[in-house]
Amino acid sequence: MKIHHIGIVVSDVDEALIALGLDRSNISEVVFDQNQKNNLHFIHLPENNLWLELVEPVSDDASTARFAQKNGLGLHHLAIGTDQLEMVEAQYSARSGSFVLGRYAINVNSFGGQIRTLFIAAKGLILEFVKVIK
């Protein structure tokens, strides 16, 4: 298992960047996710070879709006790279306390182009499985 990225919900991008010791020059790409109504700010941390995804809700009905209103800034999900989305879904669906939250496709150049995702709640933890489509 390889961690693909860490998703952090933010109510204020600039305040989040300050808290993380970063600034806007660290943002590689911003993508509007029309499915979830969030701006996704992608930051690569080369010293860790890890991506951060700052998830900024853009409306009150965004998928992360309540999380941002409650927490302001907080760890939202852990993303794991996989080539086996269907197998992962079958495994987690068979586990007690786990269920699918959603799935969709989006283009993220920072991640290599088109990706497919699968969000799963597992015992209170939100996992995002990411498959890069070539």
Image (cartoon, rainbow, N blue to C red):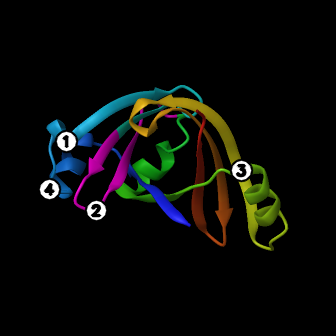
Question: Of the residues tagged 1 and 3, which is closer to the observer?
Answer: 3
Query: Where residue 21 is drawn, which disc sits there?
Result: 4
Residue where numbered disc 1 is placed: 26
Write down the region rendered in magenta: 42-60
Measure how far apart labels 1 and 3 are at the Cα level.
30 Å
The reply to whether callout 2 and callout 1 are in contact (CB within 8 Å) is no
Residue that label 3 marks? 85
Tell me which numbered mark, 2 or 1, is placed earlier along the sequence. Answer: 1
Return the residue at label 2. 48
Is 91 rendered above or below residue 57? Answer: below
Image location (x, y in percent) of residue 51: 36, 51
| Label 3 secondary element | helix
- Whichever of labels 2 and 4 marks the residue nearer the N terminus, that label is 4
Q: Tell me the CA gap for discs 4 and 1.
A: 10 Å
User: Could you say where residue 10 lies in the image, as x and y percent from the top left?
Assistant: 35, 47
The kind of residue tagged 1 is: Asn
> Is most of the magenta stretch helix, strand or loop?
strand
Q: Which residue occupies the foreground of this view, 90 or 97?
A: 90
Looking at the image, is mark 2 or mark 4 nearer the viewer? 2
Q: Residues within 10 Å of mark 4 (few under 14, many from 20)?
A: few
Image mark for residue 16: none
Q: Is residue 53 above or below residue 133?
A: below
Contact, mark 2 vs mark 4 (Cβ under 8 Å):
no
Q: Foreground mark, 4 or 3?
A: 3
Q: Quadrant of residue 32?
A: top left
Question: Residue pushed farthest front?
Answer: 134
